[in-house]
Image: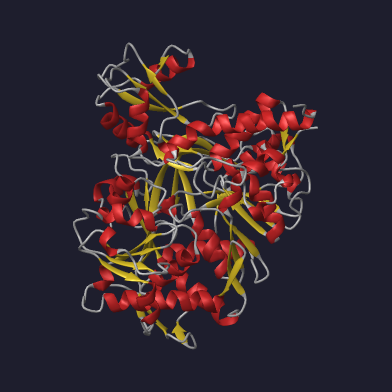
């Protein structure tokens, strides 16, 4: 299937975040899978320092910039909102 | 003989109370605002606001239950209230309830390991704990095998508590029983010397040491801060600190002494959500450790004019890098940036430095913002190893004297005697003193400049860490004596960014050792990496040579496990 540049970039960001989350999943004892709507901080999957580490790692590996203003924090921080906060264009 | 006694009478309907505010306590400061601003918001959590009256009523109900539970015991005034809470409405009501019954509150941070919380419970005189819904999973394991019975208030337990799952021997009081209890008119008969809160800090013996801050200490600080920052009922305060960090006292009682509202930072956004938090809530007061601001800067959240509503931007808890302070000043251009300094033993903050808006080369070339001059009525002195004052302009150990200094460590006379020592000079007479273990030098124009720790206490992400405490946990986890904890890596500004562990020989794997530490220490004290040292360096006294170990790290002459 063909994907646009931005969607393929999003997919790379998504897989990078999931890779970075994997060791934290076992550490935090989180047994359920992570989907786009999983609240990352509220369920204790990661803490604020983990979040920072993940953001900086994704920026470095994927050559993208994080923009916190793209996130609606009223809805919480999910995998989906985190991916969308990285500028892909 | 005690002086300055006063009486606080609280009525269950919240309509009347008497309180001699000429002798202020933390509670008296809240009550004065409650009388003047009863229908104004006092607390904001996750979009919900609670007025001064609502907060007072919630606290009064808890206070009534606590007092009723203690009614059989004439010695109730000896006891303390443990707060196993995490920034919920119940948490704040519980702080006030403890003060209403005349008990110091003892924060029990549910994020800390169970063994540490158990040490705090065993060291303190807690007879009652309040548990909120965020901490209910911790209470069972914590109380299991505790040698003395406690009264456990669970005001957030909506449905019947599953008592079968909770350890026996304790008395559990769920929400229904609390709501059904008539909040009697508790009377607290206190003096300025009585405890307001008991905090446990990282201890050099490997166990946490308690610092009992009196009403007199706390009121002295809050009144100093009120005079300095002049908050009003329209102000909106950030609240980022856990109760186990005494900077939370500043947020709560500076806000509540002025009729202002306290805004709890939502956890759901973490550090990335803090910019949205400031803007959405229209905060006017900001107070955080510099690390929080540094994280925000890394995420490019300190763009110019990002936070125009802020009037005051205060930082405390660790050295404030000058570049970071300037970046914050640009992001919050209508606020005054101040750097505060102070150990728990001297109540929240003891000195302050106001960063001028205009850049000046001699100031901006400093790596960190000065810590300035003591707050009103407090004194500082720089001394040598023997406690004698240093000549003008020379660096020395920073000693703090005045009404904010605590009486000593909780049930630790030996440690108190060594740290709560006056300088050896006539000027120091007539007040309490604390030797901080920090080095500083007095600059004529900018006041005190912080130079670092004298002993092996370090600051990691704003938390004080005794490296010996980390080593004690490592020894158990690694089943060997040859261990060391070192602050590493060191940033460009000379400050520790984290800490690592070094082990000579151990049958345990690195993962086992770190997991073992994680079970005994808060996360900020757990070594991020573990190194194996083939030839363990010893000094002439046969003790571990830390200088050599640091050299090994610097030269990468150690093996990552």
Residue B151, by quadrant, is bottom left
Reply above or below: B162 against B471: below
The residue shown at (42%, 34%) is B454
User: Which quadrant holds the N terminus of chain B?
Assistant: bottom left
Q: Position of residue B373 (x, y in %)?
A: 57, 50
Closer to the camera in the image, A47 or B334? A47
Residue under the point 29% across and 34% down? B472
Which residue corresponds to the image point at 46% horizontal and 54% vertical from the top-left? B246
Above or below: residue B548 compared with residue B448: above
| B413 relative position to B453: left or right | left
Q: Is residue B267 visible?
A: yes
For residue A9, what is the image quadrant? Answer: top right
The quarter of the displayed image where residue B408 is located: bottom left
Q: Quadrant of the C terminus of chain B?
A: top left
Residue, far front:
A1
User: Residue B194: percent from the left, percent from the top?
Assistant: 34, 68
Q: Which of B330 and B63 is in front in this view?
A: B63
Colour mode of the rendering:
secondary structure
Give me the residue at 51% from left, 53% from top.
Answer: B241
Could you say where residue B126 lies in the image, as x and y percent from the top left? 29, 62
Whole-percent x and y of residue B342?
A: 49, 49
Looking at the picture, does residue B167 appear above or below residue B67? above
Residue B310, can we see it? no
User: Observer-nearest residue: A56 or B298?
Assistant: A56
Exactly how many numbered labels are in the figure? 0
Nearest to the observer: residue B208 or residue B93: B93
């Amino acid at each position: 299937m063909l994907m646009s540049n931005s969607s393929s970039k999003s997919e790379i960001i998504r897989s990078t975040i999931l890779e970075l989350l994997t060791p934290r999943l076992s550490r935090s004892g989180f047994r359920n899978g992570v989907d786009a709507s999983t609240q990352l901080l509220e369920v204790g999957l990661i803490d604020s320092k983990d979040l920072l580490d993940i953001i900086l790692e994704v920026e470095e590996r994927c050559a993208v910039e994080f923009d916190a203003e793209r996130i609606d924090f009223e809805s919480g921080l999910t995998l989906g909102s985190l991916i969308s906060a990285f500028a892909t264009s | 003989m005690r002086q300055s006694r006063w009486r606080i009478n609280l009525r269950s309907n919240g309509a009347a109370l008497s309180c001699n505010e000429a002798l202020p306590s933390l509670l008296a400061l809240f009550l004065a605002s409650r009388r003047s601003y009863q229908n104004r918001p006092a607390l904001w959590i996750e979009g919900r606001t609670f007025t001064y009256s609502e907060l007072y009523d919630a606290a009064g109900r808890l206070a009534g239950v606590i007092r009723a539970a203690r009614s059989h015991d004439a010695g109730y005034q000896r006891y303390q209230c443990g707060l196993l809470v995490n920034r919920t409405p119940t948490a704040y009501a519980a702080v006030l309830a403890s003060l209403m019954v005349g008990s110091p509150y003892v924060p029990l941070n549910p994020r800390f390991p169970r063994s540490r919380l158990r040490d705090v419970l065993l060291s303190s005189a807690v007879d009652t704990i309040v548990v909120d819904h965020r901490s209910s999973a911790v209470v069972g394991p914590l109380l299991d095998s505790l040698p003395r019975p406690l009264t456990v208030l669970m005001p957030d337990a909506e449905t019947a508590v599953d008592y079968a799952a909770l350890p026996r021997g304790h008395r559990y009081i769920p929400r229904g029983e609390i709501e059904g209890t008539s909040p009697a008119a508790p009377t607290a008969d206190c003096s300025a010397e009585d405890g307001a809160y008991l905090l446990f800090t990282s201890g050099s013996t490997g166990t946490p040491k308690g610092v009992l801050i009196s009403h007199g200490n706390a009121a002295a600080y809050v009144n100093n801060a009120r005079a300095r920052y002049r908050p009003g009922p329209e102000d909106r305060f950030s609240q980022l600190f856990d109760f186990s960090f005494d900077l939370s006292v500043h947020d709560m009682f500076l806000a509540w002494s002025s009729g202002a509202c306290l805004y709890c930072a939502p956890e759901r956004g973490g550090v990335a959500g803090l910019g949205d938090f400031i803007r959405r809530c229209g905060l006017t007061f900001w107070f955080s450790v510099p690390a929080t601001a540094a994280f925000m800067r890394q995420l490019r959240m300190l763009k110019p004019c990002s936070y125009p509503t802020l009037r005051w931007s205060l930082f405390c808890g660790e050295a404030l890098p000058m570049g970071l302070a300037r970046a914050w000043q640009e992001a919050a251009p209508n606020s005054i940036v101040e750097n505060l300094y102070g150990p728990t033993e001297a109540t929240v903050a003891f000195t302050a430095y106001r960063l001028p808006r205009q850049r000046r080369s001699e100031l901006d070339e400093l790596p960190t913002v000065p810590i300035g001059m003591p707050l009103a009525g407090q004194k500082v002195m720089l001394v040598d190893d023997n406690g004698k004052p240093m000549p003008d302009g020379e660096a020395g150990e920073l000693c703090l004297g005045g009404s904010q200094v605590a009486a000593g460590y909780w049930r630790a006379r030996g440690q108190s005697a060594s740290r709560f020592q006056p300088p050896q000079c006539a000027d120091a007479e007539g007040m309490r003193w604390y030797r901080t273990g920090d080095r500083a030098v007095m600059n004529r124009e900018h006041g005190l400049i912080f130079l670092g720790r004298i002993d092996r206490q370090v600051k990691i992400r704003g938390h004080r860490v005794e490296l010996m405490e980390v080593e004690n946990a490592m020894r158990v986890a690694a089943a060997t004596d040859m261990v060391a904890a070192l602050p590493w890596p060191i940033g460009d500004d000379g400050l520790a960014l984290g800490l690592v562990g070094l082990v000579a020989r151990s049958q345990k794997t690195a993962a086992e050792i770190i997991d073992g530490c994680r079970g005994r220490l808060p996360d900020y004290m757990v070594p991020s990496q573990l190194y194996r040292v083939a030839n363990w360096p010893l000094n002439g006294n046969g003790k571990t040579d830390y200088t050599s170990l640091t050299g090994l790290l610097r030269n990468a002459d150690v093996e990552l496990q």
